[in-house]
Image (cartoon, grey):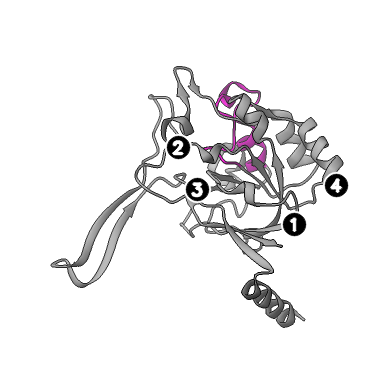
Amino acid sequence: MSSNLLASLASALGGGEVRIVDLTHTLSPDFPVIVMPPELGQSAPFRMERISRYDGGGPAWYWNNLSFGEHTGTHFDAPIHWYTGRDLPLNSVDTLPPADMIAPACVIDRSEQSAKDPDFLFTVSDVAHWEDQHGRIPERSWVLLRTDWSKKSGAAYANLQADGAHTPGPDAEVMRFLVEERGIIGLGTETIGTDAGQAGHFSPPYPAHHYLHGAGRYGLQCLTNLDQLPPTGSLIFAAPLKIQNGSGSPLRVLALVQD
């Protein structure tokens, strides 16, 4: 049976009945990274150092040394990333159950609201409105919050002001609800973090991190092309690098969509 299912999937991919949508930004030195208060440690941006390119360092080959913070570009947050998940089993990217790397997605579009207000907060009422149209969010699904923030770039993407970042994200109650009442596998956003830019002032602070990782769930950040996904029916492949005791990593996020 499984052999037939996989053969059917391969045929559907080859025939165009199922398309692949890349939800990943290109990782480059110019891609913005999260900026922490100056008294705290900072994430390093992506850097590429050439080893050789068909030259004296290697006449027949091209390769590079790479360096970056774990939470750079389109990236994955593991439970160990936050203090609420630090003591859980299987909480780092190297111990992440492989079955969790493939899961269905529910895409909730709040791009219009986010265009009007960079501090837009995603709430339980937004979930209720979506479920009225598309049905209950299934357990172990990704909730992907579409804000179209990925269409911004540079300073506008980070949107740093004197009092910190101003970007849309979830409020505390919707995160508690999605984790405890809907059992989601994780939250994906188009912004630098899963939390709103001003979420440090919420109770609890940074509720997406607090509730997701405390329950052994995951975060995806800096997604793009969410406008190419249907509200339901897509399948997400999100496999972080297998870094020993890693709290997260950049990754290639792909969605399968049946047309």
Q: Residues in magenta?
A: 189-214
For badge 2, the amino acid type reads: Ser
Cα–Cα gap, marks 2 and 4: 34 Å
Q: CA distance from mark 4 to mark 1?
A: 12 Å
Q: Nearer the viewer, mark 2 or mark 3?
A: 2
Q: Is residue 21 left or right of residue 110?
A: left
> Which of the image's four quarters has the N terminus?
bottom right
**Residue marked by disc 4:** 135
Label 4: state its secondary structure. loop
Hey, which residue is sitting farthest left in the picture? 56
Q: CA distance from mark 4 to mark 3?
A: 29 Å
Please tell me whether residue 196 belongs to the stretch shown in magenta.
yes
Q: Looking at the rendered structure, which numbered label has been put on residue 233?
A: 1
Q: How many neighbours does mark 2 have within 10 angstroms: few (below 14), some (14-19), or many (20 or more)?
A: few
Label 2 or label 3, whichever comes before in sequence order: 3
Q: Position of residue 247 (x, y in %)?
A: 50, 47
Mark 3 sits on what residue?
A: 74
Residue 218 seen in the current view: no
* Residue contact between numbered discs 1 and 3, judged by CB atoms under 8 Å: no
Q: Upstream in the sequence, badge 4 or badge 1?
A: 4
Q: Which residue is mark 2?
A: 153
Q: Secondary structure at mark 3?
A: loop
Q: Quadrant of residue 62?
A: bottom left
The reply to whether dot 4 and dot 1 touch (C-beta < 8 Å) is no
Q: Where is residue 200? Give x, y as percent.
A: 56, 24
- Mark 1 belongs to which amino acid? Gly
Measuring from the top left, give residue 108's x and y in whole percent.
71, 42
Up-down relation of residue 130 to residue 113 (above or below): below
Dot 1 or dot 2: first in sequence order is 2
Q: Position of residue 194 (x, y in %)?
A: 59, 38
